[in-house]
Image: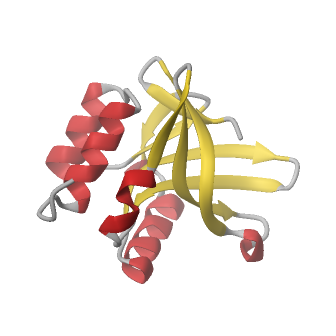
């Protein structure tokens, strides 16, 4: 990765690796629109003010770039997983690692809506299918 690659260029590269539906990649590339996924189905995040607000908060606070979001209901609460490109280029090579069969380790900020204290940065496992993604671990 050369030093002049921007966070946005890196995000587009990662979206392509995840085989995200091309119109969602184009929307991000051309207009900065982020897509969130529920069980592989994609929706524009600008339809959800709560998620859009959280993206802006994360990007301003951590100088990162959110390129996709997944949403799940779990036994410990409602979760949004913000897949990000870090401000630190030395971390980029580990941002999205293939794990086989359309599965990837992805660097993300996991927001526990019900208990914000339990929110954190870390790796999650996502599965890519049919142009969408879903967190599986």
Is residue 104 or residue 26 the one in the foreground? 104
The residue lying furthest to the left in this view is 4
Query: The C terminus appears in which quarter of the rendering?
Result: top right
Q: Is residue 93 positioned above or below 39 on the image? A: below
- The number of numbered badges drawn on the structure is 0
Q: Give the percent coordinates (x, y) of residue 90.
A: 35, 66
**Residue 32 visible in this rendered orientation of the protein:** no
Percent x, y of residue 111 = 64, 63
**Residue lying furthest bottom in this view?**
61
Residue found farthest to the right: 75
Q: Which residue is drawn at 75% across and 77% down?
A: 117
Q: Is residue 128 left or right of residue 35?
A: right
Find residue 9 and report its horizontal and vertical position in percent.
Answer: 20, 51
**Residue 19 placement (x, y as % from top left):** 37, 26
* Above or below: residue 15 compared with residue 10: above
- Comparing 116 with 8, the one in front is 8
């Amino acid at each position: 990765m050369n030093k002049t690659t921007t966070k946005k260029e890196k995000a587009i590269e990662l979206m392509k690796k995840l085989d995200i539906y091309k119109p969602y990649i184009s929307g991000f590339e051309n207009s900065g629109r982020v897509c969130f996924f529920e069980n592989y189905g994609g929706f524009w995040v600008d339809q959800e003010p709560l998620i859009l607000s959280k993206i802006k908060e994360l990007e301003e606070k951590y100088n990162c770039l959110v390129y996709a979001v997944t949403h799940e209901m779990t036994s410990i609460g409602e979760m949004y997983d913000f897949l990000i490109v870090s401000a630190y280029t030395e971390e980029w090579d580990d941002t999205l690692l293939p794990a086989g069969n359309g599965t990837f380790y992805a660097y993300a900020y996991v927001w526990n809506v019900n208990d914000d204290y339990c929110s954190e940065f870390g790796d999650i496992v996502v599965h890519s299918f049919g142009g969408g993604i879903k967190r599986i671990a």
